[in-house]
Image (spheres, coloured by chain):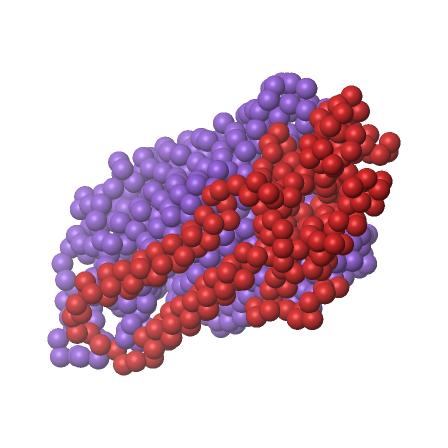
Chain colours: A purple, B red
Amino acid sequence: MTPSAESRAVPRSLLRRVFTTDHHAIGLGYLALAFVAVVAGTLMSLVMRVHLVWPDRLIPLHGPVTPEEYLALVTLHGTLMLFFVLTTAPQSGFGNLILPSQIGAREMAFPVLNALGLWTTVAALIVLLASSFVEGGAAISGWTAYPPLSAIASAGPGQGLGLDLWLASIAIFGVGSLFGAVNTLATIVAKRCDGMTWERMPLTVWAWFTAALLSLIAFSVLLAALMLLFCDRHAGTSFFLPTGDLVNGTLHTGGNGSPLLWLHLFWFFGHPEVYIAILPGMGLTSMILANFARRRVFAYRTMIVTTLLIGLLGILVWGHHMFVAGLNPFVGSAFAISTMAIALPSAAKVISWLATVWRSRPSYPTPMLFALGFVSLFVAGGLTGPILAQPILDQYLHNTYFVVAHFHLIMAMAGIFGLYAATYYWFPILTRTASMPNGRLLSETLGKWHFWTTFLGAYATFLPMHIAGLAGEPRHYAQFIGIPNAAAQHLIDGAMGMQRHITYSAIFLISAQMLFVVNLLVSWRRGELAGENPWEATTSEWHRPASNEWIAVYRAPCIYIQHSGNESGGEVFLPQWVPERKPE
Amino acid sequence: MYSNPVAALPWYLPVDGAAHGPALDRHLILNLWLAAALFVLAHLILLTGMLLRRTTAARRTTLVEYLPVAALALLFAFLTIRSERLWAASRYTGADPSALQVEVTGMQFAWYFRYPGTDATFGRTRPQLVEPGAGNPLGIDPADQAGTDDIVASELVLPAGRMVDLRLQAQDVIHGFFIPGMRVKQNAVPGQTIHLHFTPTEPGTYPILCTQLCGLGHYRMSANLRVVTPAEYAAWLKERSGGQP
């Protein structure tokens, strides 16, 4: 029985139970929050997709979708998915649930700070969702909130109180993320058990470590930027506002600032942010592939180095979001080179995944399928990265559907496949209770259906977006009809067939997620009971030491040795926590 | 809508009517084929590796570890150099001194194009004087003589074969100036004047779109680029400047 499970067995007041400092409960809390956010964000994308191709269709209980409502949906969808799903679930959710036991710690370094992080994030989500209900509605300036659109309330509906609440929400979220990052770093540095050297840390831990470092750097800068924008809006400063800016009748006569400063600060945060979202999935993919291939992770040391390298380069590539923003063209060249460079450690990871699986005849339970799907989508989305990294090509493709395809494949789809792999793989740990210490498994049958439909739906939805982008169709268009210019309407009409196909695929993709929801609900209460180490894993989150037991690890993860006399795959796996080789 | 009978190039690219366009298209198409080939290659290796009989023999890893990355490094270096040359050619230096001067102003939710008129000088503008209802959307200052002959148009008319030097400005928020048919895109940023130059070659009508989210009317912020013959351009200019040469 884990110590946390023991303490949960003791009856406590409801308040203590809710405001717990137990990392397991906090991790589940983060996952529940991410689940709410992902459901909301997904339903919003469904409304957007339906509206784009059937603009006359009324939304039930609402009516027609106006352009400002569409843009509010874009903003909320991006903000929910980026911050409250892809940052929260892999890093804070699974980080809290799995990280301590993977390094042989019984708890996180700062339990109270940890709880504070969760409740700060909950507050941020409530503030964000509340912004839809204020006068003018939610902000319409996208998750990147470029000024002056975001700096002046008269710039559009939602840019008044709606945007103030958006700023508040992200600032609160940023503070919560800093709490989480400090906690994660301190835990990894200080709480590793005996024998858990840096080189023996599972790649998931390396990913959480790197992502926490990035969080610390990136969110600090974002907080500063949010503060400056808030001052521009309410304190009469002009960090991002040039003199003589005339927005919808409001003339700015104050100081002379530059909107480009916001772009620099925002993307200095924004690009590391996408690595914060994807690194844990990359680490987990390495571990899962090795686990089910019964192989060591190919080039383990190189994988540690590439994780750190992606983190380092990740803070040096922000300018590739700004090739056409009005920078000196030499700056574009410099960022093109740093961005091309980050493709190499990413490619090294793909090669490691291919080499780990190569001639291994792996088994294919659902977590393995999602890890393989992660590899496929990471390759598909990753390969358009070097294309967009070339300024001359970006001057055609920037802010078209090509970019939407790129980041949805590599960040949204690969990211969510990482989360699904994590959920199917670690479900027994998620569902552990005092009376059921091994937890439950998700249904494999539903899981396989879920995987194949989601995999198909992901490609069917996002591959065609490349074509719409190549045809020149811009993103962020609230509707594809009623454009008061025949030539522009003609260009948009040309991609309409593709857009209809994308909407059908999106409906299919979203419907397929019901398989997961059903699986989750059914398996949480009645799923098959898991064994002690159901996937025969080597990493120590599957080890449940007694409360007085000395925790130590004895070797690197993913060690498999040949069973004598059995040549065809009779390897014995050696968990990190087992002192000696198991008797054969 | 397009004067060119070819409606779509490979990969659904729209008709390309700029001097720098064909080289850009070739480079883009090369990139797309390479990405498609690498996608197929990675999946073939993955599937083959999954299907082949299991081996447990110790493997030499150094070669597999570094050779593909080295090959990709060379490939990416090649693409970077090739594209940087194109980028340098179109962006590192300004326009020819002989280029046609046009000022482009983006505002919620329209594009305006200003030609300097016979004196080849743009008149001063002041945001306080902006009055779209009174026919002065750019706030041209009547006190400045240079502004009296300025032509303000809601479409961009350019003669084929002559380089144009656009001065991009934004009155209110950031807008994205995108002409798919000219293969150019550049944000117009409030408080800045950004130069963008290119040479249209194919006469025809090309849509100009906004590619930077600028408010609720972002989707309908568009205009036309009309590329005409030099003679037609001269006639248009004459008509717009009230018959003066």
Q: Position of residue A118 (x, y in %)?
A: 49, 37
Q: Position of residue A583 (x, y in %)?
A: 14, 67
Q: Residue at x 43, y 41 (%)?
A: A330
Horizontal placement of B113 versus A197: left or right? right
Nearer to the camera, A77 or A351? A351
Nearer to the camera, A167 or B65? B65
Horizontal placement of A189 versus A464: left or right? left
Q: Residue at x 63, y 55 (%)?
A: B161
Quick check: A572 above or below B131? below
Quick check: A144 above or below A525? above
Q: Residue at x 49, y 27 (%)?
A: A224
Q: Position of residue A132 (x, y in %)?
A: 70, 40
Q: Residue at x 18, y 69 (%)?
A: B59
Nearer to the camera, A434 or B98? B98
Quick check: A176 above or below A542? above
Whether residue A36 can be seen here: no
Nearer to the camera, A516 or B234? B234
**Res A516 quadrant in image:** bottom right
Whether residue B113 can be seen here: yes
**Res B107 quadrant in image:** top right
Q: Position of residue A229 (x, y in %)?
A: 58, 27
- Quarter of the image that includes the N terminus of chain B: bottom right
Q: Residue furthest right?
A: B134
- Quarter of the image that includes the C terminus of chain B: top right
